[in-house]
């Protein structure tokens, strides 16, 4: 089995993308957050997973998601289905909802 490349350059690119996504309601218009959410779902549907995850774990012989792979290092008995549900079904709409509340209800302009 190939040697794991945890915390290599792709990990840092992926982590940066994830962090930007998590703060996106404060950075980008809610419309851009919506487009990003749709793009994420299309990527999952068409590619059957995240492009960055596939790039990061290519050739390692597993189909872990980014979140599951690193969270199971902290808590080995963590539920893959639970993590995937939260990452795919809870977080994207929650970020859009947060963007709408922040930008429309409170009328605060995003940075970009």
Image (cartoon, helix red, strand yellow):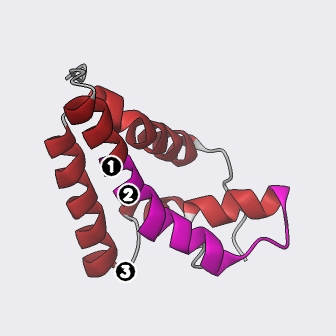
How far across and down, in percent of the image, does residue 22 sit?
44, 41
Decide which of tag 2 and tag 3 comes sooner along the chain: 3
Q: Which span of residues is magenta-colored? A: 74-96
Decide whether the magenta segment is chiefly helix, strand or loop.
Answer: helix
Task: Report the side of 87 relative to 46 (left or right).
Answer: right
Query: Along the line of sight, which residue is nearer the eye, 41 or 47?
Result: 41
SS of the residue at dot 2? helix
The residue at the point 66 percent across, 77 percent down is 80
Q: Image height check: is 11 above or below 4? A: above
User: Which dot marks residue 39?
Assistant: none
Q: Residue furthest front?
A: 105
Instruction: Give the CA separation, mark 3 to mark 1.
Output: 25 Å
Which quadrant of the structure image shows residue 3? Answer: bottom right
In the picture of the structure, the residue carrying the numbered disc 1 is 97
Residue 107, quarter of the rendered image: top left
Q: CA distance from mark 2 to mark 1?
A: 9 Å
Between the C-alphas of marks 2 and 3, the distance is 17 Å
Q: Which residue is mark 3?
A: 48
Quadrant housing the C terminus = top left
Label of residue 92 in the image: 2
- Judged left or right of residue 30, residue 66 is right
Image quadrant assignment for residue 106: top left
């Amino acid at each position: 089995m190939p040697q794991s490349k945890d915390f290599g350059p792709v990990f840092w690119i992926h982590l940066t993308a994830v962090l930007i996504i998590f703060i996106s309601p404060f950075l980008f218009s809610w419309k851009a957050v919506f487009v990003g959410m749709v793009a994420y779902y299309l990527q999952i549907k068409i590619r059957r997973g995240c492009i960055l995850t596939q790039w990061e774990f290519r050739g390692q012989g597993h189909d872990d998601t980014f979140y599951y792979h690193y969270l199971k290092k902290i808590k080995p008995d963590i539920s893959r289905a639970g993590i995937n549900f939260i990452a795919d079904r809870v977080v994207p709409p929650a970020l859009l909802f947060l963007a709408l509340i922040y930008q429309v209800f409170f009328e605060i302009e995003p940075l970009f």
